[in-house]
Image (cartoon, rainbow, N blue to C red):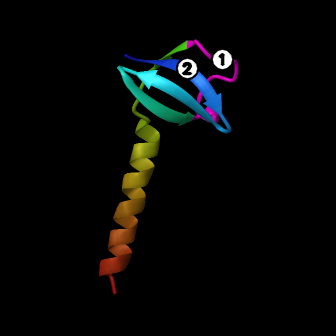
Amino acid sequence: MIKLLVDRFENEYAICEMEGEIINIKKSLLPSKAKEGDVIRVYFEIDHDETAKRKENIAERLNDLFDC
């Protein structure tokens, strides 16, 4: 699990610390109630449906390309 510390907000970005590194994240990607000093847990999850759709789209494009 990754944890972010919200240092401050600048325009549409949250300036965060992550494992000693400073990173900029769009505020719209954070929980709406996030504020300076909050620690945010970040989870990653595989979207199997979206992955399958993208693979299908790529296969269709390749078929179109080579069916000339």
The answer to whether the residues at label 1 and label 2 have Cβ atoms under 8 Å apart is yes
- Asked if residue 46 is positioned above or below residue 8 in the image, the reply reads below
Q: Residue at x 33, y 70 (%)?
A: 62
| Marked residue nearer the N-terminal end (1 or 2) | 2
Looking at the rendering, the stretch of residues picked out in magenta corresponds to: 26-38
Residue type marked 2: Val
Q: What number is the disc on residue 54?
A: none
In percent of width and height, residue 10 lies at 64, 34
As rendered, which of 12 and 49 lies closer to the eye? 12
Residue 35 screen position, x and y as percent? 65, 17
Q: Which element type, helix, strand or loop, lies under badge 2?
A: strand
Residue 3, magenta (yes or no): no
Q: CA distance from mark 1 to mark 2?
A: 7 Å
Q: Which residue is mark 1?
A: 35
Give the position of the C terminus as an image quadrant.
bottom left
Check disc 2 and report the residue beneath it: 6
Circle 1 packing at 10 Å, graded few (<14), some (14-19), many (20+), is some
Q: Nearer the viewer, residue 28 or 50?
A: 28
Q: Residue at (34%, 63%) from the top-left corner? A: 59
Q: Element under label 1? A: loop
| Left or right, residue 8 beside residue 44 | right
- Residue at 44%, 50% in the rendered image: 53
Image quadrant in which the N terminus is located: top left
Three-letter amino acid code at disc 1?
Lys
**Which of the two residues, 21 or 29, is positioned nearer the viewer here?**
21
